[in-house]
Amino acid sequence: MQIFAHRGASAYFPENTLVAFEKAKEMGATGIETDVQVTKDGVLVLIHDEKVDRTTDGVGYVKDLTFAEIQKLNAGYYMKYSSCKIPTVEEALELAKNQNLVINFELKESCLAFLNTEEKLINTIHKYDVKENVIISSFHLSSLIRCRSIDPQIKLAYLTTKVLKLGSLKSLGIEIVHPNYFITTRKFVSHLKQQNFRINVFTVNKKKYVERLLKLGVDGLITDVPDIVIETIKNFKGYT
């Protein structure tokens, strides 16, 4: 069972920061789920929103700020941390390499407005030689298709909040599905497993949902609270 910390251990530490990633690893998470945005000067950075307002002491769209301007912001401001920066894709890959973590990069719609975002991300992954430890996910099938055309082997995951017939994804080389927990029923899991998809479910924070998904036999859970999920798994009868 893979446990992905959603934006790091984001229930306890500033989301999408190195401290949140490192603390998630300490809690026992095997992977990190994080979000890619692109700065005005083309640097790939890790922040969920299109704007920096919610999670930093700055204002404005990421796409309108240079990397130098982004680096001046405190990404721990909203949780009263004084020295957190918005990290880069490269910093996450360094962490993956050193800590043996799987990194799931979600490509956000706003970052796809930039030309060659997928190519830039994949080239950076190749630079760090950690392709086996990386998943690229998106709600946008066109982006995943571009990723597949760039790299025939890199792991790709389709995000969905709807129950769909997803057999056509296989022909596109997509072998992982990330459904929201509330659509992940026994029937949907059976449909996906019949087609040999791996299933990582988001965003699972409550014990009752963890237990239900364990019974369904999903492959991974994406959570804000990796410590609680791991403890629930350890205590769940019949799960090994």
Image (tube, rainbow, N blue to C red):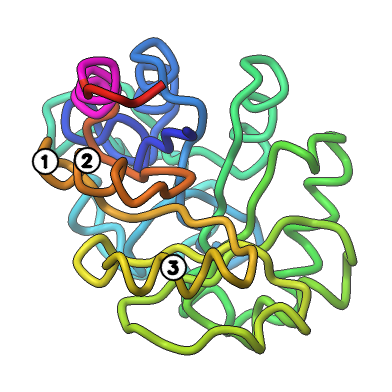
Question: Is 148 contained in the magenta span?
Answer: no
Task: Indicate the secondary structure of the residue bearing disc 3.
Answer: helix
- Read off the magenta span: 227-235
- The mark that comes first in sequence, 2 or 3, is 3
Q: Secondary structure at mark 1?
A: loop
- What's the distance in space between the residues labelled 2 and 1, CA to CA? 6 Å
- At 55% from the left and 62% from the top, the residue drawn is 39
Q: Is residue 228 magenta?
A: yes
Residue 214 % position (x, y): 31, 41
Q: Is residue 148 left or right of residue 5?
A: right
Residue at the spot of label 1? 206
Relative image position of residue 87 (x, y in whole percent): 50, 38
Q: Name the quadrant containing residue 115.
A: bottom right
Question: Upstream in the sequence, badge 1 or badge 3?
Answer: 3
Q: Residue at x 88, y 64 (%)?
A: 151
Residue placed at 34% from the left, 14% from the top?
Answer: 27
Image marks 2 and 1: residues in contact by CB distance under 8 Å? yes
Q: Is residue 63 left or right of residue 208?
A: right
Residue in front for this viewpoint, 190 or 39: 190
Q: Which mark is residue 210?
A: 2
Residue lying at the far front of the rendered structure? 238
For the residues bearing labels 1 and 3, Cβ distance under 8 angstroms: no
Task: Looking at the picture, tell me which residue is in the foreground, 164 or 215.
Answer: 215
Q: Amino acid at mark 3?
A: Ser
Q: Which residue is mark 3?
A: 190
Percent position of residue 230, x then y: 29, 22
Task: Select label 2 or label 3 by which is in front.
Answer: 3
Camera-near label (2 vs 1) is 2
User: Dot 2 lies on which element?
Assistant: helix
Query: Which amino acid lies under the numbered mark 2 shown in the image of this protein?
Result: Val
Question: Mark 1 or mark 3, which is nearer to you?
Answer: 3
Q: What's under tag 1, amino acid-wise?
A: Lys
